[in-house]
Amino acid sequence: MSGPAASTATSTETSTTTPRKRRSIGWLLLLPGALWLAAFFVTPLVQLVATSLYDPNGSVEAGYAMTWSWGNYTEALDFYSEPFIRGFVYAGIATVLCLLIGYPLAYAIVFKAGRWKNLMLVLVIAPFFTSFLVRTLAWKLILADNGFVVSTFKTLGLVDDDGRLLATGFAVVAGLTYNFLPFMVLPLYASLERLDHRLIEAAGDLYASPAQGFRKVTLPLSMPGVVAGTLLTFIPSAGDFINSQLLGDTNQTMIGNSIQTLFEAGSYPAASALSVTLMALIIVMVAIYIRRAGTEELL
Amino acid sequence: MVRLGRWVSDHVVAGVGLLVLIYLFVPMFVVIAMSFNDPASRAAYTLDGFTVRNWTNPCEPEGLCSSLVTSLQVGILATVGATVLGTLMAFALVRHRFRGRGTANVVIFLPMASPEVVLGASLLALFVSTAGGGVLGFGTILIAHIMFCLSFVVVTVRARLQGMDTSLEQAAMDLYATESQAFWKVTFPLVFPGILSAALLAFALSFDDFIVTNFNSGQTVTFPMYVWGVAQRDIPMQINVIGTAMFLVAVLLVVVSEVLRVRRERVR
Amino acid sequence: MTLDTTDADGAADPGTDVAGAGDLELRSLTKRFGDYAAVNSLDLTVPAGAFFALLGPSGCGKTTTLRMVAGLEVPSDGEVLLGGVDITWAKPYKRPVNTVFQSYALFPHLTIHENVAFGLRRQGRSDVNGPVGDMLSLVELEDFAGRKPAQLSGGQQQRVALARALINEPKVLLLDEPLGALDLKLRRQMQLELKRIQLGVGVTFVHVTHDQEEAMTMADTIAVMNAGVIEQMGSPNELYENPRTTFVANFLGQSNLVDADISGRDGDDVVVDAQGAKVRIPADRVQVNDGKVWLGVRPEKVFLASTGEPHTGNSLGTARIVDVSFVGVSTQYLVRMGWGQELMAFEQNTGARPIMRSADEVEVRFNGAHAFVLDHAQDARAGVDED
């Protein structure tokens, strides 16, 4: 490449077609997908916001009237603050656990697996070809009251003699951690894979202990993977209701359960108000988190 | 002593990684075992006896196989739809400069950053408010699946396209290929692996989706919907047969493609 | 060593519609990116069959020029003519011009055979096996036809890129830093190889490079480009021996440039006052008629004589040696002149003269027919340390 000027030239205009023509082709290619997203992602979100302000006394059959009922929000938050908080707490714990056990796995695959690297990567993904629900049901069996895990925990004194694991926060968090672990491992793997191994050796050469080398070199350079992984884990777990439903009971309801139950009961305005609040909270948290982590370019 | 310490510190990470991998496989072992389970009673979801009956009669439980067929139909159609739309979008975003690219990128990113429950709920709100509850069914499931698979397809194909050297297309044109020949002889074959993995991802997402589907399915039952339904009552062991079979098919696909790749590289 | 001509039936030859001599002509060719002119009103004629090099530092516009000839970039202004035919607006695939790309741009999904056959197939030729085989043997890669590009070494890939372009029998072959990715030893070897192939096939080669040694080794004609314009064009010998700008003097090899004034004319010579020393330079080596100038002498043209040694020719006065570097074939001296400037002098280690030592006093002499006089308005450091 012959210098900065020429290289910008080649990257911005690589074809002989005129820019105007290329611009219209770009629009044309984008159009079908963009229309689909506009119709079935953006419009529904607008509709969701509208529905959250409808008269709560309406019904699907009779129709709803737009009454700008901001009360839907205060009522929903009053009534559902507990599952809201629980949902975020469970998702937060599950995300931290995923990071703690996912990082060593990703690290081992990249730096320790050698020629088994591809195989290990396949093994990480493989269980996920089996249905999410079928696997969660398997956990239900593993954590069952008469199962091996509970009896071991009882022997170790981790659980009371009449205690159980199912229908506890432990089971729900364990299920979330398990189900979303690959969403943590894969981005971590991708960012560690890109990391130049010689940098870690250079750190060692410059008197960094392995722990210091990790803290000062490996971890900062894998931050994009950490950020992407935590987002991909936290966001779906915060809205999940399957784990709480199958592994927990009414004391472990998360916000996803509340939304789902309200919709099934036909209370659309209240359910919508909860959904909008959830979405808004997540967007705010993600924005703050990304800014803090200094990885805006991730988007 | 020093030597032992070094060995331990060199292998501790690998050991932890291996343990985590085993943890990932624990439920898989249970699913496989349960597929051969002969339960003491219909209501009990516990490991009792051994039988191959579940494997010989996978369709015995009412509605299981029809739900599977529905899932496959939705999966295939959603994959085709999302892959076509998403690939076009990826080309537009990587190869063309136009006003509104930034907005387009954000709109494509957002569905991936939205909890599924919000995606499902908002679509339900739209469907019900515009056409009433009666429209819910196969069509609305398909619309929803194409929507949430689309972003993943765009991201996957875009990554592949960005990694592709544009000088290859220029070289093709320099060697007397017209624009369309350059596309079909060079660009497309090189991007194809990306499109293929995007399609596989889309199929996996669609086939396994429960939350969004649950909001928009009406009376239509997909396989995850079926499992959800029976999980509240008594669970037929055959769902484990399906789970194991899907696992085996996926692993087989990976193994075959890997063998083909190695052989292709070793030829000559 | 010729290209296979037995099946050049003309129908598939993209160049047959171009009549007359195959000279490549650029007329006031200009390429602007925004306000920045990467190539600024360039006029250039490359005679058919020449090995032509466009030499210049990064960002001088040479690659952009090449891409406009290839049709990969549309000029903002000006024309490109090939054999008298205007091809300025022709698509890349409509021009009898082929390119060896900088990173080769071999198609990774196709075998070497299919890479080389690509151009012929696009032109509708079905009998590709013969020409491809001949071409692969020309670049000595017959045994690699079935491999994929990734299985070849850098030098082999480079030869495939060359074969892939040459098989189309282009009127002009464009080479964009074709040896940039190779290590020094392989680069030397490929320079000779390229020259051999060019002489064999007789195709016009236009070679873009920032490596002055590469350009001088291979090309019959070099155009030195800087900031979008051609500074000077000529044979390697002309450019080196009689540079017309400070940029050329510094970019091709090294030069001592001394602050001087024109003081008059004496027959065919111009008399120059260099820091008090009167020196005579032939008029055809002087670019300006009066006023302040740079007097240039290449380091190897400087002769360091012991003081008092009788001489004819020019002297710049006495100097003291401040540094001596022994580099095997030659010894490189740095001497400080009376006016404070440090000059370089290279002397062959013929063994005829003893090697001098630091702090020795010497007289700095040169032959006027080996020096040159440049416009003082130019930057004395233009082209130094650029590549």
Image: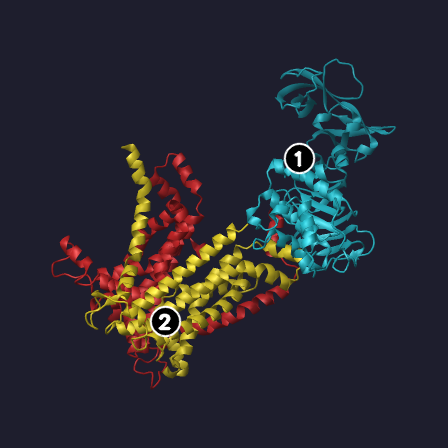
Chain colours: A red, B yellow, C cyan
Separation of disc 1 and disc 2 at Cα? 69 Å
> In terms of secondary structure, where does tag 2 sit?
helix
The reply to the same-chain question for discs 1 and 2 is no
Disc 1, disc 2: CB below 8 Å? no
1 or 2: mark nearer the eye: 2
Which is more toward the observer, C287 or C164?
Answer: C164
Q: Position of residue B127 (x, y in %)?
A: 40, 79
Kind of residue indicated by mark 1 = Arg
Which is more toward the observer, A92 or C374?
Answer: A92
Q: What is the chain identity of the residue bearing mark 2?
A: B
Kind of residue indicated by mark 2 = Val
Residue highlighted by disc 1: C381
Residue highlighted by disc 2: B212
Q: Is residue A289 visible?
A: no
Q: Position of residue C153 (x, y in %)?
A: 57, 43
Which of the 4 image quarters holds residue A143?
bottom left
For label 1, count other residues whose C-alpha is less than 10 Å away and answer few (under 14), some (14-19) or many (20+).
Answer: some
Q: Position of residue A123 (x, y in %)?
A: 36, 55
Q: Is C262 placed above or below B184 here?
A: above
Residue B183, disc: none
Q: Is C266 placed above or below A122 here?
A: above
Which of the 4 image quarters holds residue C185?
top right
Q: Is residue C1 visible?
A: yes
Q: Position of residue C108 (x, y in %)?
A: 57, 53
The reply, left or right, for residue B98 in relation to residue C287 is: left
Q: What is the chain identity of the residue bearing mark 1?
A: C
